Amino acid sequence: MAVTESLRGGTTEPTGAPAVHEGILRRQSARESAARTYARALPIVPVRARGLTIEGADGRRYLDCLSGAGTLALGHNHPVVLEAIRKVLDSGAPLHVLDLATPVKDAFITELFQTLPPGLADHARVQFCGPAGTDAVEAAFKLVRAATGRTGILAFSGAYHGMTAGALEASGGAYDVRVARLPYPQDYRCPFGVGGERGAELAARWTESVLDDPKSGVPRPAGMILEPVQGEGGVIPAPDGWLRRMRQITADRSIPLIADEVQTGVGRTGSFWAVEHSGVTPDVMVLSKAIGGSLPLAVIVYRDDLDAWQPGAHAGTFRGNQLAMAAGTATLAYVRENGLAERAADLGSRMLSQLRKLAGEFSCIGDVRGRGLMIGVEVVEPEDHSRRDEGCPAALAGIDGAGSGPGPAHLTAAGEAGGAPGQADGGAAADLGRPGGGVGVLAGLDPAGNAGATSAGRVPAGRRAGAEATRGSDRHPRPAAPDLAAAVQRECLRRGLIVELGGRHSSVVRLLPPLTISDEQAAAVLDRLADAVDAVTRSHAGHDRGHQPNPRHRQYDDRADWTG
């Protein structure tokens, strides 16, 4: 019997499932290269998935807050995506068309241009690239070099732009004379030791000095590339004012500005494109991941006056992926029509607020930051070998309460089977923004989640009133703790939660849930994360309880995620 067949219906592990699971993992280890990554930290064998939930070959179910590294804006196998793919398959349309014009491609471009930031859509060109974001980065570099006749690129410390040669050159940690690295502002680990607006101002002045000093060793570059939120760099949102300064600095010097929106795009940060928070219109946008609706697709969109390419200047065999274009059109339209970017802003700020309360109880959480549903929890060496509060009542009590609101059966109808969040159907999504709306960890919180005081939502809520009193300690953050972060990731997996690690030292626990996540699901995610941190902290302090899930916590019933 096929593995997928044996898992249909019910939650009981099928006979032989553990053996199948272990056998597949053994063969992967024996046959795949040493370069494999996610499979090492997440030894699962997915066989079925819907929405937020993945089911493994061993019968276990997981809440997926990795989402294909941000690829799955609508979660796994969303009905509108599946319908779009089936429509192309059933139509007899060619699946591979190189760069030929097709109705499917035309519809994708039309929808994509409809979402672009003001100032770009009316003067835009699009180039379809190879199916990975890194190829789109390469295309952006080739474009601005052709348009300007210059070769150098300005990039930023902590950046990640892909794994091909040119993209790696612009990423943090690489060495290439054509790439000049500039300081990227951040509050928690400010490169200048001051943080806040002052730190961002110093970073901007540094950039101006490098460009204007004839002895800086940096000739006028072909372009500047930046991420509006550094993802792999540790979920570091760029201050809006700093982004505007970068736009002004580059415009004044005729340097094209390239925005890498591969992970931040399509509503992830609470605006359709992350640059829109600051009102910045870049010259080039690099897009991938979510624009393909779970299938491989990458493009660059750029101002038409930069289109200095000759025919064939950038090509690729698989740039005409019809299925990805159809899935992408469906995803872009669904996010736009159902206000999922606005939902991400609201729900994300409330999740950040609750995580900051959790940070107040565990000294191993150094910082909580993010924008929308792109969230990072930085794990650091604890102040000592015990928790600040043995029982952690404030954090965990806030995560326990889940006694009201619609149950999982409704969740499937509204949140995962195609129902639009915000419908007047009594669903959890419809409660967003109402006092007391939602359930569990999010119930009754200020819809702003105390995150509106800063443009990028980085200042911990518990530090607002006493900012001056804590400034000294904030300017000297404790060392990153990658081993503890890895332990938190393992404990999350044991509790049925998939999270990613990122940051300079792989010490940032990252949450990238689909934009369709409901309030109840968000509460379950924070439940499991809090329990994992609790287990790791207790073990680190020397009084291990066996790392079992806290019995006080409500257990989210994911069986209702599977219908039909």
Image: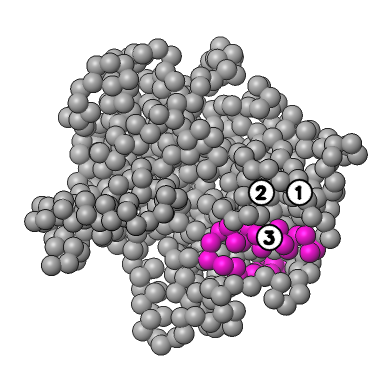
Instruction: Tell me which amino acid carries mark 1.
Output: Arg
**From the viewer's perspective, is 460 left or right of 563?**
right
The dot on residue 351 is none
- The structure residue drawn at horizontal position 52% and vertical position 52%, both measured from the top left corner, is 263
Determine the residue positioned at 34% across, 31% down: 487
In the depicted view, which residue is nearer to us: 74 or 387?
387
Give residue 169's mark.
2
**Nearer the observer, 153 or 375:** 153
Contact between labelled residues 1 and 2, with CB atoms less than 8 Å apart:
yes
What residue is shown with label 1?
178
* Image coords of residue 128 (percent x, y): 60, 70
Residue type, mark 3 in image = Ala
> Which residue is the extreme one toward the right?
214
Q: Secondary structure at mark 2?
A: helix
Give the Cα distance between marks 3 and 1: 15 Å
Magenta stretch, main secondary structure, is helix
Q: Which mark is residue 140?
A: 3
Q: Alpha carbon of mark 3 to alpha carbon of mark 2: how far? A: 13 Å
Sequence order check, earlier mark of 2 and 1: 2
**Position of 415 compared to 218: left or right?**
left
Q: Residue flagged by tag 2: what amino acid is it?
A: Glu
Q: Say which element carries label 3.
A: helix
Q: Is residue 175 left or right of residue 362?
A: right
Do the residues under discs 3 and 1 have CB atoms within 8 angstroms? no
**Magenta-drawn segment:** 119-147
Task: Give the residue furthest to the bottom.
Answer: 92
